[in-house]
Image: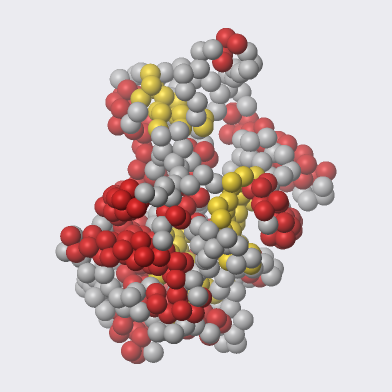
Amino acid sequence: MVLSIKRLQANMPRGPVEEEPFGKSALTTHKPIFTFGIKHDGAPAVASPKENLKWLLGGKGAGLAQMASIGLPVPPGFTITTEVCAVYGKYNRNLPDAIWSEVMDGVLLVEKQLGRTLGDETSPLLLSVRSGAAISMPGMMDTVLNLGLNDVTVEAIAKETANERCAFDSYRRFLDMFGDVVMGIPHADFEAELDALKKSSNVEHDSDLSVDQLKELVQRYKAVYAKHNIEFPDDPHEQLGKAIHAVFDSWDSTRAKKYRSLQNITGLVGTAVNVQAMVFGNMGDTSGTGVLFTRCPNDGTNELFGEFLVNAQGEDVVAGIRTPKPIAQLRDDFPEIYAQLRRTCDRLEEYFKDMQDVEFTVQEGTLFILQTRNGKRSGAAAVAIAVDMVEQGLISMEEAILQVTPEHLDTMLHNQFTNVHAVEYTSAVIAKGLNASPGAAVGVACFSSAEVEHKRKDGISAILIRHETSPEDVAGMCAAEPSSMSYMQLTTVKRFVFFSSK
């Protein structure tokens, strides 16, 4: 264990740290990590399935713990608590050795659960490292997938799975994500290399690249690191330490602080970090990934609503590189998976007593649930869902009333076009997109967040039109829609989107 701690701490940024023993003075009375999906004896603290620990584990961590506790298929892992994030700030963006020891204990438990080892040359463990605050902040903080890959472990994964393409596809994704999120290399630099290779290879989609082309892309991505005079850390323990630091740092990123300010989010001590065994949606035609609502968030219809991609990882669904398929098509393409997903969603609604927003991955025909949270919805959907759940016996009348908020009612009061199919409307249409604000609006067309902010300061109504959105657009979205930002504003990525001012 001493060796593992030293490896984890290698080359970590360090500031002056008080040499006080880790304990109540640093983290009050709570354990620094909580496990989920771990079946071995002697595991550290496990969140009680009925205890609301969202403030300590973050929304994502609490959801994972609760899903695992009721037997849903959740990959094993552990959550580093929000209080540790506060300690990280107190210790000048550092953590005491005792906390790193607890982190390594968590890794060891995952290793034992799966019979794999982080950095092993024959059966390596790969991890995801994801943020998770107590209040959802979509896209504001950071995620790293496929952690643990290097030139040795990628070959081990390729040999073990007999799927060289998946191994090197995962490796190039990791180099990109780790470089962007952890090392500060612009994502655009990696995208430029990918686009250049696709163009020279005459392929349209990432999934069309051959194994040899993916290997070439790995080398191109390494050259991006070299161009920035940054050395890619081959040691998976060092990768893990740096990724955890990066997630904690993202709590205080400009975009995250701007978001909390605009949304009036106060009283939180930091973000949790979820370290979880990877599952792979990019292992071929019987694998995939998707996001869904257990009911339609637009009108409340009791049908699964969402999108999925075959042979892809989670980021692909919202990246706009490939066109996702509607979740209903899963029923035809993978009926057994769809049936299992339907049963799982019913179980989630029964447990959480609300419509859920779910992220899932299918690895070679096996379903895994990676996240759940109460789903955002339109005002009309909120009313319909509340009524239906009462009629189904899932919630009481009192609970239904609490599900419909003043914001939901407000969205139902905005002006609407009376008949969008009438000739006077259809003949005047010059563009179509996904509306991210309720009702009809009039304003100057703007094509950047900065332009919207300038118009707003001059008292001019504006409509923000984007081919795609990113977390960096938050300020412009809020300037365009200064009341509470809608769910679509916060989560729509890679779309042709309209945001209206008032």
Query: In screen coordinates, is 69 left or right of 129?
Result: right
Q: Is residue 404 above or below residue 116?
A: above
Q: Residue at x 49, y 71 (%)?
A: 163
Residue 285 or residue 496, whichever sits in front:
285
Of the 4 image quadrants, the one containing the N terminus is: bottom left
Residue 268 or residue 121, whichever sits in front:
121
Residue 433 or residue 322, whichever sits in front:
322
Q: Quadrant of residue 494?
A: top left
Query: In screen coordinates, is 155 left or right of 410?
Result: left
Of the 4 image quadrants, the one containing the C terminus is: top left
Q: Position of residue 4 (x, y in %)?
A: 36, 86
Q: Position of residue 122 (x, y in %)?
A: 44, 85
Q: Quadrant of residue 463?
A: top left
Q: Position of residue 240 (x, y in %)?
A: 37, 72
Q: Residue at x 33, y 48 (%)?
A: 199
Q: Is residue 43 above or below residue 497?
A: below
Q: Position of residue 112 (x, y in %)?
A: 53, 85
Q: Residue at x 72, y 56 (%)?
A: 335
Q: Quadrant of residue 496?
A: top left
Q: Residue at x 58, y 78 (%)?
A: 38
In the image as oriented, which residue stretches furthest toward the top? 424
Can the viewer see residue 401? no
